[in-house]
Image (spheres, rainbow, N blue to C red):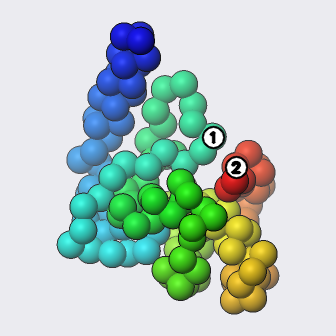
Amino acid sequence: MSKGRDKHQERHHGLSLYGKDLVRRCGAHCELCNSSGVPLNIFEVPPVAADPIFEHCLMICETCQTQIERPKRIDPNHWRCLGTTMWSEVTAAKVTAIVLLNWLSKTEPWAQELLEQAYLDDDETAWISQWALD
């Protein structure tokens, strides 16, 4: 049991090394919904590598994180912001936006409309194909 805890602490420490750079990049706003004045957490965009990768990390609010982790309880109105996020220069944010839009497009026509406007390069398409919300 101690091994698992040690691995978790080691990973958390590795992620915390990115903290200052991530906060600088996000400007203290959630990188998905742009909320400010709320606590932000480091979120690793799947697939998660053995060692943390800066380019796979986002600073997101608790609302976004909870809904990503429990997509069956997703509030579609919260995600209308993805129309902006899908054009982000931060690839991890763009990939996350497209994955969420794919999920939402099953029931939300506006999400499908946004997906039809999206432009993805080959690397982004490959990344997205490795992650699906359950």
**Mark 1 is on which residue type?**
Pro
Residue 51 position, x and y percent, is 49, 26
- Which mark identifies residue 20? none
User: Depth check: 21 or 14 in front?
Assistant: 14
- Secondary element at image label 1: loop
Q: For the residue carrying disc 1, how many other residues have a C-alpha within 10 Å: few (<14), some (14-19), or many (20+)? A: few
- Which mark identifies residue 47? 1
Looking at the rendering, in which quadrant would you find the N terminus?
top left
Q: CA distance from mark 1 to mark 2?
A: 6 Å
**Mark 2 is on which residue type?**
Trp
Which quadrant would residue 36 be assigned to in this image? bottom left
Which quadrant would residue 110 be assigned to in this image? bottom right
130 is higher (above) or lower (below) than 68? above
- Which mark identifies residue 131? 2
Residue 64 can be seen, yes or no? yes
**Looking at the image, do the residues carrying marks 1 and 2 touch, with CB atoms under 8 Å apart?**
yes
User: Depth check: 27 or 121 in front?
Assistant: 27
58 is higher (above) or lower (below) than 74? above
33 is higher (above) or lower (below) than 19? below
Who comes first in sequence, dot 1 or dot 2? Answer: 1
